[in-house]
Each structure stands twice: as structure tokens, then as C-alpha cells.
Image (tube, rainbow, N blue to C red):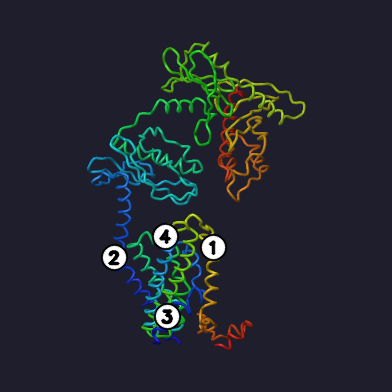
Amino acid sequence: MKAFENFAKGIIKENPVLVLLLGTCPTLAVTTSVSNAFGMGAAATAVLLGSNVAISALRKVIPDKVRIPSYIVIIAAFVTIVEMVMHAFVPGLYDALGVFLSLIVVNCIILGRAEMYASKNGVGASALDALGMGIGFTLALLAMSTIREVFGAGSWMGMSIPFVSEYTVPILKEAPGGFFVFGCLIALVNKFGSHKPKKEFTCEGCPSFGLCGGKCSVNDGGSGEESEAV
Amino acid sequence: MKNDGIKSIIVLGSICLVVAILLSSINYVTAPIIAQSADSAVKESLKKVLPDATDFEEMDLPDGSPETVTGVYKDKGGSGYAVTLSTSSSYSQSPLTFTLGVGTDGKITAVEITNYAETKDFGSYPQSFVGSDSALAGVDEDLATGATYSATAFKNAVSDAVSVLITLGGVNEGEKTEEQITEEIMVASLPGAVDSNGKIRLTETDVKIEGVTSAFKADNGVGYIFIGEYNGSKLICAVSASGGVAVYDMDANVVPDVDSAFVENMRLAADFSAIVEKDAQAVANVLSDGDMLENIEINDHFGVVTGAYKSGEKYYFVAHPFGYSDTMTITVAVENGVISTFRNSGELIQKSEYYEGFELDEKAYVEGIIGKTEETLTDEVVLISGATITANAVKTSIGDVFKVYKEVSAK
């Protein structure tokens, strides 16, 4: 049961895009079409799964001082693998995703999960966490891209939809439309989501927490609530 | 503490090593597939332009082939050739790539665009090449309005492709139509009526002269072109506003012994009263008080300069090149080989010509031209970023002015 909860939390309760607000850049960029969104979601999930498993397996070996460089090397390796495989087997999708594929390396979701979860938990739990988060990311992208493609271009997965295609709202395909849909989806999830984000969203979730122990927020006159939460 | 540092180095180094081995082994597997898929993308475009082809054989490109031609493929079944091309339009960063199918008769059978990144759609322009041979007759340049740079680059690339095939002995040179030959001679005989895209801009006029079948007036008023018959052969006669007359035959050779009455009739039929009046007005606008003006005759000039005047040591010239949307009237004064006045009637550049973000300080631009000689007036001085057509018009005008200046000042 705990395993299922571990897996399911990323889908709605702690959805990386709509609740934790991570990975916003690719979310806005690739959600102009459903096929691109699906490709990006699948690529990010594969990287997330690979890096979470590898980091979790190596968590006791990697010294604290070099953990961030080590995580980045591991994540970059998986991104490059996904890139090479995609270039070889799905060249159309590889061309469509362009630079955003390489930018998965700096996607906050991947590094965030490595630091917050995989480095502290076992391989199985980390794999489930990665799958849940990856699916949550993909579903958020699919929801956003469906709205943008259907109402912005009058099609879904490139297939034209009768009637709707005659009354499109082209701004939805542009950046302002992306922000608008993104905002609406966040509002919906906040309204109907059963739980607020957990305290991983606080100071403890910061990649530098291990070094400063939450002192920075006190010194900077930062949020007292966050310090107490730590 | 020291051990921690060493451990960190060993762990990070080992991770990097494992990652490097992993990536190189995956690259070993995927690289041939990626190369194969790029190759099959090319093959696919070959198949699209020559659907009846059985198998393709890549041919060696001859030495000195243009860079635009990236590959020539021959159908082993003998249906024709496919040429892959890549050209830069200098408008867009991304190259324009396409594949051309050419039949054994030298005629273009199909055009397949594989990459096109200009903002304005090409429309049906590329397809207008289908059916033409190396002479490129029947190409409709009006179909590419708004994508001029790419259209020119495209046409040049097609010419390159066909010329490489001719060099390889694959196809024979195509015959130019009479219409094409006539246009080429018209361009050569009256260059002043040619716009910055290399197209001659004429309007047919109704002139009744014995032996003349059609008459055209240049849209910028710099001359007339008459097409007629003399002693049973077709002739093309250019009459320029500055008084020059030249007669060509259909081999583009000058015909010297044409009946003077026939030529005189054409000279009289060419009405230049409007441009003469415009020139006098343009010069009057730049004259200082009390300057006495003398009209100078120019011999055999067919460029954009239509009028020349002299006041003391100063020579005034008026030119009418094609601007961005209208004919310009540029007045240039030259004194001892140095430009002393440069003026365009009205605003030099229309706002609509600029790309967004560009704007010219016209006063500084004109000041940059004044004081220059033919040698010191470089392309950098004339260049206007974001307004190429106007810059070309200025360059043509000043070039023609110096040509005429040399002739009249030597007298």
C-alpha cells in the first residue's frame, strides 16, 4: 500500500508541474502539440527513472561534497542516451523537440527528485517515485497540450477536428496562451486537489539544505515558518 | 579530511569513466542507424522526385562544382537524374535544401523542398520550374512575391544543378525561347530600366512607326525599347533619355548599318519631355543662387542617368533608379572628381522598407557620401542595413554618375 502511495503521489497530490511548479520552461515550450508533449513526457520519465535508480544505488558511495556534480553527470548521461536513441529511432520527434531535449539535464524535476528522494531512499522506492513523477509530468503536459492544440489549432495529435478547426483561438498556441492555460490548470488543481504540497516544498527541499541546514533563511531574515518547519 | 577529498575525486572520476564507456557503447550502436536514417531521408526525396526510378547510383561531382550542389544521383533504370541542393538565401540562418528531379531530356520533372525556414511562404514558385530545361523558360517569378531573396537563391541553385548535369554529360543544354532571348537583349541594351532583382521593368506603349512591331517605355522613364523588322531580320532598338540609340540583332550584336531614317523615327517617337522637366526641377533645387547652368549632351549612356548639367567646374547629374516602391530622383554634383552634393527628392527610405529595429540617420548617411571620390566611395559607405533595395539604387546611381562624369569631363 505504501508502495502504491509512493507511486501515486506524483500524479496529482505532488504533481511536479501543477503543484510543485517544477519544469515550467519545457512545459510551456513543448505543449503546443500533443505529440510533442507526449514525446517530452516519455523522454523525461525515462531520464527520471534511470537517474533515480542510479543515484539511489550509489547513494552510500557518493560523498556529500561531490553529490551535485555526480548527480549532474549521471542525469546528463541518461539525457544523452535518450537523445541518441530518439535520434536513431524516432528522428521526427527528435527534430520536433529540438533543444528542449538536451535541456532535460537542467530540468528541476530530475535534480529535485534525485536530491530530495533518490539520495535518501532505496532503489525500488526511488524507481516508483520516478515513475509516479514522470507520469504526473507527462499527464500535466498532455492536459495542457490538449487544450492548446484542440482550441488553438483545431486538431489533436495532428488530426483535424471538424467544427472546432473553424473556430480556433490562435493565441493559445503562442507563449501568452501557454501561460494562460498553465495558470488555469494550476488553479484547478489547487481548488480540487485534496492536499496541499508537503513540506518537501520548504527549506528542506533546497539542494543546498545539507550544507546550510536552513541557516540561510534565518540569516536572510527569510520566512520564519520555513525555519520552524525544518 | 584528506581521505574525504581523495574519495571524492575517485568516486566522481569513476562515475565519469563509467558514463563515458556507457555513452560510447550506445553511440557505437546508434551512430550507424542515425547515418542510415539521414541517408534514407535523402533516398526518400530522390524517390519522390523520380518515382519511376529503380535504383540510384551516386555520381562523382566534377571539379569546381558549385557549393549549392550536394549530390547527383543517376537512376540505374535510365529515367533521369536527381540532384540534392543546399543554398543559403542570406535572409535566413537555416539553409534552404531541396531535391530536383531532371529527366534524360534535360527537363525538370519534380521539385521536393526538404528544408525551408523563411517567414513568408514560397507558394507555388518552386513548382513553376517543373517542365523547364536549362534555359529555365516559363518560370513565374511573380509567384515568389515577398520571398525575393530565397527565390533568387532557389533559381540560382536550380541553374547550378542543371549546369552540373550538363558538365557530367547527363543532359543537353536547353534551347532558350525567343521571348527569353529578347528579354536578355533588352536587359543588356537598357540597363537603366533594370531593377535590383535584375528584372527589366517596361510598359508597352502605342507607337506607330513603319517597321516597328512593338514599343515599350521604361517604368522609370530612362528610355524606350522598340522591336521591329529591318531587311527581314528582327531588331531590338534602345533609345535612352540622354540621347543614346543602339540597335541589336537577335544574336545580341550591335547592328551598325541601319537606315538612319528608321532610327531617327524611333528617336522622335520616344517622348522624354516629362523626365527632362523633372531633371531641370531636381537640379534647380540644389543650385546656389546666381549659378549659371549649361546643359551637357551625353553620348550613348543607357544607365539611370538622364540629365547632365555644368556650372563652372561643377557637374550636376540626375539619375532615376528604381527604389523600394517607386522611382527615385537622385541629384549628384561632382567637382574635380569629388561628390559635392547628394540629394534625393523626398525621403530617401520609406519606413515600410526597414526591417523592424532598423532606422537610418539620413543626414549622416548623405554626409558620408559627400566628399568621396569614385575610389573612396566603398560599398560600406553606401550600404544601408535593412534597406538593401534603396542602397542598391544609390550604388547604381553613383556608379552611373561617375561613368558619365568621366565622359563629359574629358571633353
Quadrant of res B59: top left
Q: Answer yes or no: are tags 2 and 1 on the same subunit.
A: no
What chain does mark 3 sit on? A
Image coords of residue A166 (percent x, y): 49, 54
Q: Chain of mark 2?
A: B
- Secondary structure beneath dot 2 equals helix
Residue assigned mark 4: A96
Q: Residues within 10 Å of mark 3 (few under 14, many from 20)?
A: many
| Residue occupying the point 77% across, 28% down | B289
Q: Are marks 1 and 4 on the same chain?
A: yes
So how many labels did they put on this image?
4
Helix, strand or loop at label 4? It is: helix
Question: Which residue in the structure is indicated by mark 3?
Answer: A8
The residue at the point 66 percent across, 37 percent down is: B370
Disc assigned to residue B351: none
Give, as a three-letter code, the residue at label 4: Ala
Mark 2 sits on what residue? B29
Q: Is the residue under label 1 in contact with that under label 2 (CB below 8 Å)?
A: no
Which residue reaches farthest front? Answer: A163
Compute the Cα span from label 3 to label 1. Answer: 29 Å
Q: Name the residue that disc number 1 marks.
A: A177
Mark positioned earlier in the residue sequence (4 or 3): 3
Would residue B146 be found to the left or right of residue A85 on screen? Answer: right
Q: Nearer the viewer, residue B307 or A182?
A: A182
* Marked residue nearer the N-terminal end (1 or 4): 4
Q: Amino acid at mark 3?
A: Ala
Comparing B179 with B174, the one in front is B179
- Distance between mark 4 and mark 3 Cα atoms: 30 Å
